[in-house]
Amino acid sequence: MLTVDEHDLIRRKHLVDEMSQRAISRELGYARNTVAKAIANPIPPGYRLSKPRPKPAIDPVKHIVDAWIEQDKHGRPKQRHTGQRIYERLRDEHNFKGSAIRCQLNTRAAGISPARKPSCADHQDHPV
């Protein structure tokens, strides 16, 4: 993985000094693919996971939660499950040992419950 300084050095050698990718690769000791990626991206790419992190608490009951969420899509909006309600049902009906925040994050990822509901104070245009 290149540091930001190394990334900038490669780009500077190519764009300012007009060196070829092959010459930069030979001089700095990086693979030509690495040099090509550094030249193509003006900002160094961030860290990317090779595979998603495991979720051992929620994975065994994820199919149950997904079924509830699917049923909620056909119901009335006021009757839908919140993350907290899903946690309570899992805890009571399925002996769930995970945390409430895991259920809330799972429903948020499914697009059910927003991260934060706007309050009345967010919409006030005049001082109190």
Image (spheres, helix red, strand yellow):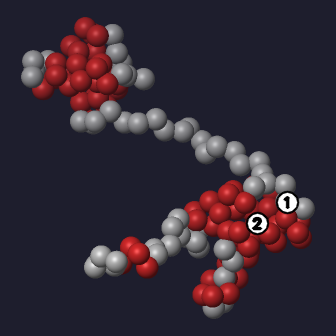
The residue at the far front in this view is 128
- Give how far across and how far down residue 13 sits, in percent: 16, 18
Q: Which residue is mark 2?
A: 87
- Give how far across and how far down residue 83 sits, in percent: 67, 68
Q: Which mark is residue 96?
A: 1
Instruction: Name the one closer to the observer, 99 or 107.
Output: 99
Mark 1, secondary structure of its residue = loop
**Mark 1 belongs to which amino acid?**
Phe
Which quadrant of the view contains residue 125? bottom left
Instruction: Name the one closer to the observer, 5 or 13.
Output: 5
Can see residue 35?
A: no
x 43%, y 79%: residue: 120
**Mark 2 belongs to which amino acid?**
Tyr
**Mark 1 and mark 2: Cα distance apart in space:** 8 Å
Mark 2, secondary structure of its residue = helix
Q: Is residue 2 above or below residue 69?
A: above
Is the C-beta separation of discs 1 and 2 under 8 Å?
yes
Left or right: residue 94 versus residue 50 is right
